[in-house]
Amino acid sequence: MKKNRFVPMLYAILAVLFLFGTAGTQTEASQTGEEQRLLEKLGRYCQTAVNGQWEYRCLEKIQREEKKYEVNLSGTRFGQNKRNWYLRNTIRRAASNEYRLRLKGKKISERRLALSSDYELLYEGKDVGAILPYKEKSIVFNPMEYLSRVTRGALELRPEGGERIGDFEARVVHFKSIWTSGERQGTLTGRMWVHPETGAVWRMSLEPGSWRMFESEEIPKEFSAVARLGLSSLRRALSWTAEYEVEDQGVRFPSRIEIKEEYFDESGERLTANSWEISYDEFQFGSGEPASPIKTTNPVLEKAGAYCERLKSIALHYFCEEHIIRTSYLYSVREFVRSTGERPRKRWNLKRSVTQDVLYDYQLIKKGDRLEEKRKALKYKGKTWTRKEDPPNILPYQALYIVYGPVGFLSNYWQSRFDYFEKGSEKLLGDRTAVILTTQPNEFREENGVYGRVWVEPELGAVLRISWDPESIDFFHPEEVPEAFSGLEKRLVWTAYYEIEKNGIYFPSRQEIREEYVSPAGETIVGDVWTITYENYKFFTVGVDVEIKK
């Protein structure tokens, strides 16, 4: 699901999956039997660590040391120009966050709620921004994400001897991995320190070449080129090392990260400009591996698959009225402290709400390979809309072809690419009992990676409701938080209802979308709510046609 685009409904092309089990093919011929067994153990461990489901929260402490330099230019007796750098001052900063990490549906997501900055307590959290390395460039420093990327894209694994860690001799394994994220692709190179018996990763280090794209980008002035003297700019090098010292259910999690930003020239001189030390403590682990998924031969899944295949194959042509109502809730914010020494808190009091609405004439046509939806504005804020241009857009999140929502979860094609877990039942549409299934992808992929809950009518296989898990909706820029909700976690709650039946097919009756903000104490503040209703259907065609791909 993307902003103004809904991937599960577009039957996205499956991303190529690089399996860890195929790694090392370039070096197997030269590996000993012991080395091959080590890589097999490492492969099994990594598959365990980045599969299934886990989540935890902990205290994250960040310390940053920034060094400021001055540069002087001088000549040598040979007439060559030379630069000399002198340390001017050192700036030290610190911050602490409540840090949450979650693996579900092959996707690792992280959340931070700031607790303090430079040793001062914050009001219900606040984005401390620059203290995190390269945050403005969305550079990932999460060790579990790097473990996942190596798992997916390892092209070469090469044992390189051993090194003592604690009370055992760890085996050092060099890796080269190609990872893909959307249109971006990168190469990771580095080393892993592996337990020889369990295959668990105890330490990982990434080589500077992993960030080669930032070697010459936005070099600080004191390290930049001096063209008039023929001096080129220094190059940036980043080094990254993570220790995995916390264990839960056989998986080791990061306890500490060290990052350095250095600058170097052709002569080999290196200057450290920034260094970060990030530590993790006070771990609280949540839900672990879920129950075994139900089999694809399950009668409910089989009927749901047949229903989606029919939905894909029929010709459709219908009109209805689409009514979008946006309600924005405005708050006054008051800061308070319950007792001396306690962290300051905020309280949100609702002042008023503002409502806007647009009424559209909505049309969907599916015939052969043609799939098209059209909207024509009828009313804006209750008044007839007569202008040629469209009214102001009050819905920033647009679901394309909402009628095909079930296909992205339960068609025969996608059933082989999701795991399903039965979570009880619920009465819908009066006396009908719907089976509730939770879904999650069973493979790494960039498109159609969203997951959530679906309500399926067990006799017909019809999908009556879809609710997307907020953790899987990552397109809406969760870091963009209004000032009134500064420091709170933003999430999007999205549910679609299918309650209009025609010829055995259930059409959308409404959607509900909520922007919510969650405080560190768990309080939920509602920001904006969108209700989209579909009424006064006029069906022209609900019949047999050709199949839509996937």
Image: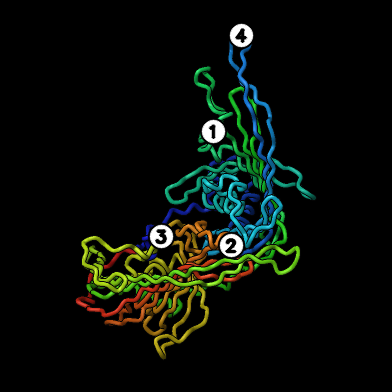
Q: Which mark is residue 78?
A: 4
Identify the residue under disc 3.
2
Amino acid, disc 3: Lys
312 to the left or right of 61: left
Do the residues under discs 1 and 2 have CB atoms within 8 angstroms?
no
Q: Earlier in the sequence, mark 1 or mark 4?
A: 4
- Name the element at disc 1: loop
Between circles 1 and 3, the one closer to the viewer is: 1
Image quarter hosting the C terminus: bottom left
From the viewer's perspective, is the residue at label 2 or at label 3 nearer?
3
Which amino acid is tagged 1?
Ile
In percent of the image, x 56 and y 48: which residue is there? 135
The 10 Å Cα crowd at callout 2, few under 14, some 14 to 19, many 20 or more, is many
Lower position in the chain sequence, tag 4 or tag 3: 3
Disc 1 residue crowd, few under 14, some 14–19, many 20+, Cα 10 Å: some
- Say which of marks 2 and 4 sits in front: 4
Distance of mark 1 from mark 2, alpha carbons?
Answer: 35 Å
User: How far is mark 2 from mark 3, CA to CA?
Assistant: 21 Å
Q: Which residue is mark 2?
A: 102
At label 4, the amino acid type is Phe
In the picture, residue 261 is in which quadrant?
Answer: top right
Could you give the CA–CA distance between mark 2 and mark 4, rounded to whole angstroms? 60 Å
Left or right for 207, reference 165: left
Observer able to see residue 493: no
Quadrant where the image shows the N terminus: bottom left
Image-based side of 300 in relation to 292, left or right: left
Report the number of numbered marks: 4
Q: Residue 189: where, in percent of width, then height?
A: 57, 41
- Neighbours of disc 3 within 10 Å: few (<14), some (14-19), many (20+): some
